[in-house]
Amino acid sequence: MADFLVFENLSKSFGSTRAADNVSLSIRKGEFFSLLGPSGCGKTTLLRILAGFERPDGGRVLLDGEDITALPPHKRKVNTIFQNYALFPHLSVWENIAFGLRISKRPRQEIETEVERMLHLIQMEDQARKRPDQISGGQKQRVAIARALINRPQVLLLDEPLAALDLKLRQRMLIELDLIHDQVGITFLYVTHDQGEAMSLSDRIAVMNRGRIEQVGAPAEIYEAPRSSFVAAFIGDTNFFEGEVADVPEKDYSRLKIDGFPDVLCFNDKQIGKGNQVYLSIRPEKFNISREEPSADGRHNKMRAHVEDVIYLGTHTKYWVRIQDYRLAVFRQHSRFLLDEKPIRWHEDVWINWHADDGFMLERYSESDERLTNLPPQQVGENGLEDKEPTSS
C-alpha cells in the first residue's frame, strides 16, 4: 500500500528542547496509526505540525503527494479532536455537527442530509436537540468526532481524546472509535501516552522518546520484539538483566554471562557480538514457575528463585521472586483453576524457566537507554518506572 501521509526529516525546537529531532515517518491511507510515548516525547508536536498549528524548523509534510508544510490550517484536509472536545455550549448537538458545513456555506439540503448521516453514525439521533451540558462525556466525544468527520477530512487527528473520561467509559469509547474508523475508512492519527489504548486500536504504532521515533510496527511486533530498552520498558511490563555476550554457539543464539547466574541462552536476532554489554528483557508472562524442577531442554533456561510476594489478580497471579540481586515479576495465567491444587506461597523456594526465544537482547549503551541505566535493572517495571518494593502477605 502506498504511503499517504509522510513526515520527512521534521525538526522542531522550543528553546533548548528538541521536540522533533529529524523525524521521518510514513502512514498508509485508511490506517489507524498511533503516536505513543511519555509526556514531552514530541508526539503532540508532530500532530500540531500536521494540523498547521506549528511550523517545523526543518523538513516537510506530504499528504497524498502534496507538500502541505506551508499551508494554513483551514486549507489542510485534516481535522483535529482535542481532549476537551471544544463543543459550542450554546449550540445543540445538531448545530454543533452542522457548524463546519454552515461556515462553508453549503446548501441547506446537503447540510441536513449530512448531519442526519453523522447522527446515525454516532447513534445519537434522539439527542440531536440537546446542548452539550445535557449529554454525557462519551456522547460529547461522539459529537466531536461527528463534527470533525462531516467535513470529509483526509486525516482525522485525535489528541489524547479519551483522557477526560473515566475508565469504563474509555473502554467503551475505544470500541466505538474502532467501529467508526471501520465505517468511515479514513486515516486516523491518534496521539496517546496510554499503551493500552494504542495497542487495542492501532494497525501500527510509532513509539516516541525525546523527539525521536524508537520503533514503528504492529502492536504485537512492538510488544514481542522491542528494538530498544526504552520500548521494552514502556510497552507493558518487563524484567531487565545486565550481562555480557559470552559466546555465540549458534547463528541465532548467544550465551549471556550475568553475575550470580548460570549462563543464559538467548535468541540473538540483532546479531550482537561476543564481548558486548547488553540488557536481557523477559516479559513476566514468559516465565514458568513451579515447585518441581523442570525437565532438561536445550532451548530452556532454568534456575532457583525465592518468592517474596504473591498477588492474586483474578485472571492471573503475579509473583515477585528473588534471584541473587534481581527481583523479578512472574505472571501465572489462570487458564484452569483447581481447588485441590496447593498454590505457591510467600517465602517458598521455586523453579522458574523460560524458552530462549522469549528473551530479547538489547544494546545497553544507546542514548534512549539513559533513563534505564540509572535504575537497578530489577526495578524497571511497567512504563519504565521504578516499582514499589513488594509488601509481605
Image (cartoon, grey):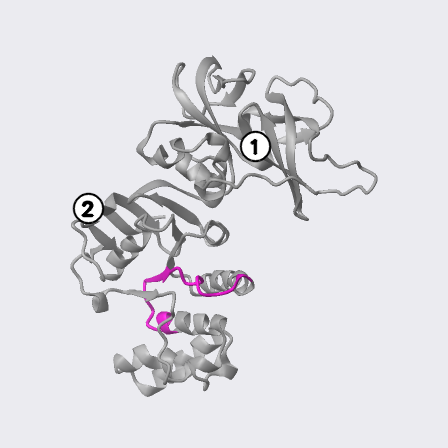
Q: Amino acid at mark 1?
A: Leu
Q: Give the residue drawn at x 47%, y 72%.
A: 137
- Which image quarter is the C terminus in? top right
Q: Residues within 10 Å of mark 1 (few under 14, many from 20)?
A: many
Q: Amino acid at mark 2?
A: Ser
Q: Give the residue drawn at x 46%, y 13%.
A: 246
Kindly give the residue lying farthest to the right in the view shown: 340
> Horizontal placement of 358 versus 83: left or right?
right
Identify the residue position indicated by label 2 in the image.
Answer: 16
Give residue 234's quadrant in the image: top left
Give residue 22's quadrant in the image: top left
Identify the residue position indicated by label 1 in the image.
Answer: 328
Q: Give the residue drawn at x 38%, y 27%.
A: 364
Q: Residues within 10 Å of mark 2 (few under 14, many from 20)?
A: few
Q: Is residue 21 visible?
A: yes
Nearer to the camera, 54 or 32 = 54
Q: Secondary structure at mark 1?
A: strand
x, y percentage for residue 183?
A: 47, 65
* Span highlighted in magenta in the image: 147-167
> Horizontal placement of 352 versus 357: left or right?
right
